[in-house]
Amino acid sequence: MSMYQIILDKIHQGQSPYAGFPMDQWAGAWFNDSGAARETFKKAIDRLKPKLIVEVGSFVGESAIFMADHLRKRGGDSAILCIDTWMGGIDHWEKRRGDIKFWFGRPSLYYQFIGNVMKRGVQDIILPLSLDSINGARLLKLLKIVPDLVYVDASHEKEDVIRDYEAYWDLLPKGGGMLVDDLTNWFPGVLHDWDQFLAVHKIKNAEIEGEKGLVIKP
């Protein structure tokens, strides 16, 4: 059984979340990730050769779609599980609220995500899990779903970030990788919690490239 089918069965009881979705109504938003960031994704994937990538914080799908495109080019049996509430973070509500579309009083980010995935034709690689990051990690542990690579890009708030790091570090097998985003002065909470995480786990070989960091579980 393929990794995609395993995740579809365990998370969605075998029912596609894309079936019957009005793609054209929702696709298209915020596709502007830099070329340097994309190279970091490619390097991590080529190095770890993951069968399962778990993305924590997916927004409208840009990073997941790029990773899915790269997985397809590589070939083999791989899938990406995207975990998000799709409600937006406090930074979106505070600073970018005008960018968020609403649907019956709730942000429509999930529908934009699904539409974008379908428009790019990678719905056979990417699956969503609509939960907050911590309950998402708990569910993966309960279902014995083990990622090879985790990409953490959820809350940017101090203490939220390290909770995510710890929850998903715990899920990784030896040799698995955790890639994190937004190591920049724009997000002091991320920088603080990243440094704290490295200190707690006595990690001295973290690899930094641009705003992203990669650690391999020993």
Image (tube, rainbow, N blue to C red):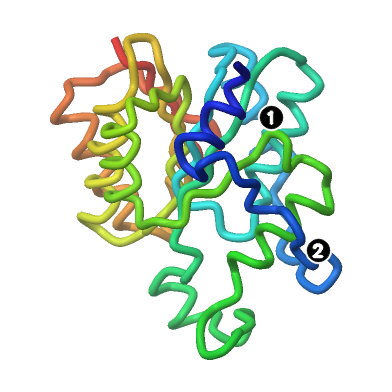
Q: Is residue 156 above or below residue 207?
A: below
Q: Quick one: label 2 or label 1, which is nearer the N terminus?
A: 2
Direction from residue 67 to residue 85 in the image, left or right = left
- Contact between labelled residues 1 and 2, with CB atoms less than 8 Å apart: no
- Quadrant in which residue 146 is drawn: top left
Label 1 amino acid?
Glu
- Could you say which is closer to the camera, residue 185 or residue 23? 23
Q: Residue at x 51, y 82 (%)?
A: 106
Q: What residue does disc 1 label?
A: 39
Which percent across, then down, holds residue 67? 67, 34
- Helix, strand or loop for disc 1: helix
Q: CA distance from mark 2 to mark 1?
A: 28 Å
Direction from residue 67 to residue 189 in the image, left or right = left
Q: What residue does disc 2 label?
A: 23
Whether residue 196 appears in this view of the structure is yes
Residue count near mark 1 (Cα–Cα under 10 Å), binned few <14, some 14–19, many ≥20 = few
Label 2 amino acid?
Met
Q: Is residue 133 above or below residue 112?
A: above
- Mark 2 vs mark 1, foreground winner is 2
Which percent across, then down, holds residue 93? 46, 80
Direction from residue 101 to residue 164 in the image, left or right = left
Q: Residue at x 81, y 73 (%)?
A: 25
Please state, as top left, top right, bottom left or bottom right, where the N terminus lies in the image: top right
Which percent across, then down, holds residue 56? 44, 45
- Helix, strand or loop for disc 2: helix
| Label total for image | 2
Q: Is residue 194 above or below residue 213?
A: below
Q: Residue at x 65, y 47 (%)?
A: 16
Please state, as top left, top right, bottom left or bottom right, where the C terminus lies in the image: top left
Whether residue 182 appears in this view of the structure is no
Q: Residue at x 33, y 15 (%)?
A: 173
Which percent across, then down, holds residue 9? 52, 35
